[in-house]
Image (tube, rainbow, N blue to C red):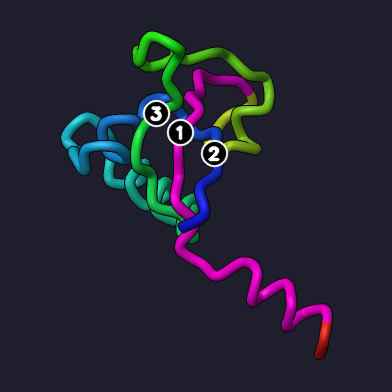
Amino acid sequence: MKTTVVTAPSIWASYLVNGDSSGITEQDKIDADRYLKDVDIVDVVRDDDGEGMDPYFTHEYYLHGGDDVGGQVLDYVAVLTTNWELEEYLEGNL
């Protein structure tokens, strides 16, 4: 199992980590599913004491699945659901 860190809007946290979409719009849910189609979010990134890291502002919100220029994001721990190594091998050998 390969994990990575993914940055995405902080407003999606409850939906991504707990599956609770009650705090977001239907469009947010569609955007989150589309942006994170190749990963399963398992948690937020945590500090050394096990506390979830705080959201932070970025002027590149749109690069992390957001729908505006700037916004609050979080770093999430994700499991890759696509076999990246196999895809990279096939792309390099076809």
Q: CA distance from mark 1 to mark 2?
A: 5 Å
Tell me which amino acid carries mark 1.
Answer: Tyr
| Farthest bottom residue in view | 94
Left or right relative to 94: residue 21: left
**13 and 78: which is toward the camera:** 78
Tell me which amino acid carries mark 2.
Answer: Val
User: Which residue is located at x 44 percent, y 51 percent?
Assistant: 79
User: Which residue is located at x 34 percent, y 42 percent?
Assistant: 42
Asked whether residue 82 is drawn in magenta, I would say: yes
**21 and 53: which is toward the camera:** 53
User: Which residue is located at x 62 percent, y 35 percent?
Assistant: 62
Percent across and percent down for residue 33 are: 39, 53
Q: Which mark is residue 76?
A: 1
- Mark 3: secondary structure: strand
Among numbered discs 2 and 3, the one appearing first in the sequence: 2
Q: Name the residue that disc number 3 marks.
A: 44
Residue 10's place in the image compared with 30, above or below, is above
Q: Which mark is residue 6?
A: 2
Please provide the residue range marked out in magenta: 70-92
Tell me which amino acid carries mark 3.
Answer: Val
Asked whether residue 7 is drawn in magenta, I would say: no
Q: Is disc 1 in contact with disc 3, using a CB cutoff of under 8 Å?
A: yes
